[in-house]
């Protein structure tokens, strides 16, 4: 059993810079947790603190019910996969996989069995005699994952493991890692996983729960769908989802918002009651369409340009001088690509999916 | 061949017309640099009068007499003894140098400790110290210890990483190696010494080979150290024995001296060429690839 729990965990560097501000988080046993955030949000620092590669300045870190603040990495029951793979260049793949087991004085037969099992799991039995410099990026990546698996750790830590791969390989490895996690869990091997990435697609597709970080502070921890449907604040709303949510300044007047000379009535019961005045209005590009839907509001817009992505058309337009983007299925949107810049456009905002945030930066959501 | 490679070739050949001029100049320079060495080999076959009468290196006759005579020396020992002595100094000294310098460089490059910056500056500062300044105090210390006329004064100081140039070189090399691998090894369960042995030393191999080669050549060539600390002829290394063969009283058979100089050069040259390919070999092949 290996749940990971962080209690008011802090990191302050010797120069006084505070990178992590009192993080409270519980990663359940066997869960796939993703840390996501823009660069510099301290997600890697937090992971390295769990690994024991960075000291913890304050708070408490428990792994499997044990406080591990002052334990060296090898006593924490973890394995880590690095962004640059960090394979030992002077050892063959076999020795790379076996190194940790050798240090732990594992018996020869068991060592061999575990190395071969991991190699089979990752389909790299034919690579065992090679040296790291003879591997492609994807193969090196698999070896790095294999090195973590053979140790049968209680917690797997991944530090942006796919960011050095090309887009196609990254997508393939993403599926593979998710599959691996599920199959290890089904096989009864504990596989609590913390996965760090800056890529929200990776986070959304791989994570069972996602922890969104900004500047060393947790913004929201929830399942991918909950993050998408009910972002806690404007930062999470804009970070999760691609293309990002339209978030524009607006004025609340009674039960409607006003922006760019437009009055958009709000659906009853979706939002907490708030005083009239400045706030931020949010609507995802996929909730703006050409056809009317129940509860949608017709809007007159001016076309700026379109990007045809194959299955859908990203449409950029102005409403009374306020910029928006929409994501329209190709079968409806292809005609848009023929229109001139500045052409008038009739669109429908699905207000049932609208979001409101307070006017301050990263303002909290007003969803009821 | 790709277009880029073709362009590269052209750049090297400078539009392809003048490579012969380049080679001619390089060849000429090489001959100027190497001529003394060629002359040395040639002169080992010459008689005294021939040596002083011509600057050409081609001898009028070839005979290995000078080598045989030079090897025997005018003392009761042959050069075999002196070579053995040289190795008895050089090999232990290389071993203690590598061990001590790698340990010290590892500490400076990878650990945080109190006064690290100041200590490192002092260490680098000692490189500026003229060695001659240390001779007298060191001599007095070793005399007190009763180490005179033994190899200890020539070997033991190196066991304390006093060859600061090597420490500096290794520290710089270590700073260039990414820490990921060490962190991976920490997670795999290495302690600091296992990390050094299993990860750092293999990565440092090219730099360690450089240390071995330099220390070998410098120690083989060292004249002053043995001259000061060694008194009995049976302990002399090659460098002292060579000087001794230029006797002060009788007329010198230069061919013998030269012949044995040529032989004395062989180990250094051999070690250099054997290690040459490792100088260039990079260490950062851990496989960062897109």
Image (spheres, grey):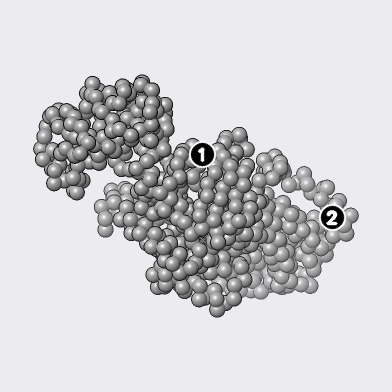
Pinpoint residue B150: horizontal percent, then vertical percent: 81, 63
The residue carrying mark 1 is A216
Query: Under tag 1, what secondary structure?
Result: loop
Mark 2 is surrounded, within 10 Å at the Cα level, by few (under 14), some (14 to 19) or many (20 or more) other residues, namely some
Q: Can residue B144 be seen in this snapshot?
A: yes
Question: Is residue A151 found left or right of B106 in the rendered image?
Answer: left
SS of the residue at dot 2?
Answer: helix
Q: Exactly how many numbered labels are in the figure?
A: 2
User: Are tags 1 and 2 found on a single chain?
Assistant: no
What label sits on residue B142 in the rendered view?
A: 2
Closer to us: B224 or B5: B5
Side of A35 where A2 appears, left or right: right
* Foreground pick, A350 / B131: A350
Residue at the location (71% across, 70% down)? B84
Residue at the outermost front position? A269
Tell me the residue at 38%/39% (across/down): A231
Q: Quadrant of the N terminus of chain A?
A: bottom right
Looking at the picture, tell me which residue is in the foreground, B25 or B163.
B163
Residue A158 seen from this side: no
Quarter the C terminus of chain A occupies:
top left
The residue drawn where x is 66% and y is 74% is B68
Distance of mark 1 from mark 2, alpha carbons?
60 Å
Query: Which residue is at a point 63% across and 53% down the rendered structure image?
Result: A67
Query: Residue A272 is drawn in which quadrant?
Result: top left
Question: Residue B133, how many percent across, how many down?
Answer: 77, 44
Rendered view: A279 above or below B23: above
Q: Are marks 1 and 2 in contact (CB under 8 Å)?
A: no
Image height of B129 relative to A129, above or below: above
Question: Callout 1 environment at 10 Å: few (<14), some (14 to 19), or many (20+)?
Answer: many
Q: Nearer the viewer, residue A166 or A328?
A: A328
């Amino acid at each position: 059993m290996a749940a990971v729990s962080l209690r008011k965990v802090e990191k302050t560097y010797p120069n006084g810079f505070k990178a992590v501000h009192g993080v409270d988080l519980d990663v359940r046993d066997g869960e796939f947790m993703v840390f996501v955030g823009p660069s510099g949000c301290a997600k890697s620092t937090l992971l390295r603190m769990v690994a024991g590669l960075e000291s913890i300045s304050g708070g408490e870190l428990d792994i499997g019910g044990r406080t591990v603040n002052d334990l060296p990495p090898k006593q924490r029951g973890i394995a880590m996969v690095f962004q640059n793979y960090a394979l030992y260049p002077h050892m063959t793949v076999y020795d790379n996989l076996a190194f940790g087991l050798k240090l732990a004085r594992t018996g020869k037969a068991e060592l061999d069995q575990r190395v071969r099992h991991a190699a089979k799991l990752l389909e790299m039995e034919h690579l065992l005699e090679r040296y790291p410099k003879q591997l492609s990026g994807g193969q090196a990546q698999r070896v790095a994952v294999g090195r973590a698996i053979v140790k049968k750790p209680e917690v797997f830590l991944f530090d942006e493991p796919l960011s050095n791969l090309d887009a196609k390989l990254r997508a393939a490895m993403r599926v593979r890692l998710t599959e691996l996690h599920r199959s290890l869990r089904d096989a009864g091997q504990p596989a609590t996983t913390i996965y760090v990435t800056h890529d929200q697609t990776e986070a959304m597709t791989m994570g069972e729960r996602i922890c969104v970080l900004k500047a060393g502070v947790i913004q929201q921890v929830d399942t991918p769908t909950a993050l998408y449907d009910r972002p806690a604040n404007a930062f999470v709303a804009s970070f999760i989802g691609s293309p990002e949510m339209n978030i524009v300044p607006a004025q609340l007047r009674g039960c409607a918002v006003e922006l760019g000379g437009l009055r958009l009535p709000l659906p009853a019961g979706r939002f907490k009651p708030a005083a009239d005045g400045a706030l931020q209005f949010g609507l995802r590009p996929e909730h703006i369409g050409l056809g009317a839907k129940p509860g949608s509001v017709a809007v007159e817009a001016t076309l700026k340009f379109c990007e045809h992505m194959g299955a859908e058309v990203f449409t950029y337009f102005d409403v009374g001088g306020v910029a928006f983007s929409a994501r329209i299925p190709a079968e409806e949107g292809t005609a848009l690509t023929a229109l001139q810049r500045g052409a008038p456009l009739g669109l429908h905002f699905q207000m049932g999916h609208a979001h409101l945030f307070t006017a301050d930066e990263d303002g909290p959501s007003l969803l009821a | 061949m790709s277009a880029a490679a073709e362009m590269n070739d052209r750049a090297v050949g400078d539009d392809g017309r003048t490579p012969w001029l380049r080679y001619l100049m390089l060849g000429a320079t090489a001959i100027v640099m190497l001529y003394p060495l060629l002359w040395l080999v040639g002169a080992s076959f010459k008689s005294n009068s021939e040596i002083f009468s011509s600057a050409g290196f081609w001898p009028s006759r070839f005979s290995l007499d000078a080598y045989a005579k030079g090897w025997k020396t005018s003392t009761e020992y042959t050069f075999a003894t002196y070579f053995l002595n040289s190795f008895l100094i050089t090999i232990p000294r290389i071993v203690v140098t590598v061990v001590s310098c790698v340990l010290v460089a590892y500490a400076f490059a990878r650990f945080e400790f109190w006064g690290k910056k100041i200590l490192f500056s002092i260490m680098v500062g000692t490189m500026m110290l003229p060695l001659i300044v240390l001779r007298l105090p060191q001599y007095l210390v070793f005399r007190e210890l009763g180490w005179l006329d033994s190899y200890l004064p020539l070997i033991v100081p190196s066991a304390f990483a006093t060859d600061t140039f090597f420490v500096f070189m290794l520290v710089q090399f270590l700073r260039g190696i990414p820490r990921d691998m060490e962190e991976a090894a920490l997670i795999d369960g290495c302690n600091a010494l296992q990390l050094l042995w299993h990860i750092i030393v293999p990565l440092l191999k090219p730099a360690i080979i450089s240390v071995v080669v330099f220390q070998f050549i410098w120690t083989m060539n060292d004249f002053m150290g043995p001259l000061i600390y060694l008194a009995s002829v049976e302990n002399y290394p090659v460098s002292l024995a060579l000087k001794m063969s230029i006797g002060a009283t009788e007329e010198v058979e230069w061919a013998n001296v030269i012949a044995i100089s040529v032989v004395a050069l062989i180990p250094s040259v051999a070690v250099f060429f054997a290690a040459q390919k490792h100088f260039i070999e990079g260490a950062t092949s851990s496989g960062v690839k897109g």
